[in-house]
Image (tube, grey):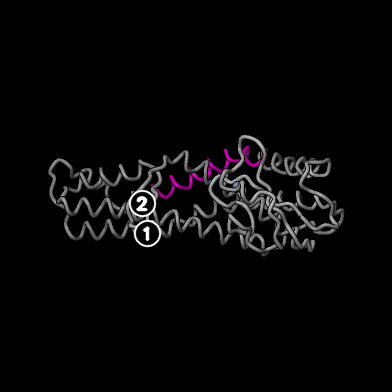
Amino acid sequence: MRAIDRKAGPLARKLVAARAGLEQAFWRRSGIGRYREAGRHPRRLTPAEIAQLKEAIGELQQSGDDYAQAIFEAGTVLVEAGWLNAKTLLEIETGYDVVPPYVLAQLRGYAKQFAFLAISRERKALEASLTSSVMEGESPRLAARRISATFAEGYHVFNRAGEITRRTPTKVWSTLVARTELSRAANMGNLALFKEAQVENVSWMAADGPNTCPECSEADGETVRIGSAFPFVDVESPPAHPNCVCVLTPADEDLGNFTAPDATQQAARTRADAALAAWEGS
Ligand SMILES: [Zn+2]
């Protein structure tokens, strides 16, 4: 999983850039810049201004596509690396040279779903900020300041009651997302190859060392039929949680033992590393 950590940098930058794009679009559409100019003579927000702000916040949802695209593009390379990695692990010499399109379609679905969730949360945080402004009868200038501060805080995590429970600085959040989504992409490539090669059983393998996920230690070494959810973690493939660094290994008896790191596994990782390095250099 070392290789995946190394890739967190470029994707994190992409995600930060995608988010900056969303924010720019928001400020442009909201017209709040104009309210700031009028700040010398504060007056309360008019119903028309409130409607305009609500509309701008609503449109945030549509800009989420840039965000999904950034995740998808970076993920595609990792799906391919995961696919090659698994192919080498099974010592398949010929065939299986191209990742089937349905795997990339699945990745795109994940990226969109993820972007949708992230943007929905930010929209909720901005709506809450606007509601406070209206209830307290704030001037347009104060409302603009409050909304701007909400953006600057970073990402918002809500509880079931719809209250903000955590604020994560944008940079920290981007790195977490990059790690998790890259892990997902690499594991999707792995799993897809195992399925195509008709592997029947797979084992969950938590990473050894300081990066081991405490959440996954119980699932470590568990074996299921491919495509079934693992006990304890309830997913068919890592990641089981943000920052998860687990992997799957084939567990059919006639395939040999893949749990101990041996020369074959080492070769597979070296090859995946090479694929990643080539992408990083491009
Ligand atoms: Zn894990």
Left or right of 83: which side holds 158?
left
Mark 2 close to ligand 1, CB under 8 Å: no
For the N terminus, the quadrant is top right
Numbered range of the magenta stretch? 1-24
Q: Earlier in the sequence, mark 2 or mark 1?
A: 2
Determine which of the numbered discs, if any, sits on residue 59 in the image: 1
Q: Nearer the viewer, residue 36 or 204?
A: 204
Q: Nearer the viewer, residue 118 or 282?
A: 118
Q: Nearer the viewer, residue 259 or 154?
A: 259
Look at 21% across and 43% down and name the residue there. 37
Q: Kindly identify the amino acid type of the residue bearing the numbered disc 1.
A: Glu
Question: Magenta stretch: residue 153 in it?
Answer: no
**Residue picked out by circle 2:** 26
Numbered disc 1: secondary structure:
helix
Give residue 189's position: percent from left, percent from top. Answer: 69, 55
Main SS of the magenta part reads helix
Numbered disc 2: secondary structure:
helix
Left or right of 180: which side holds 165?
left
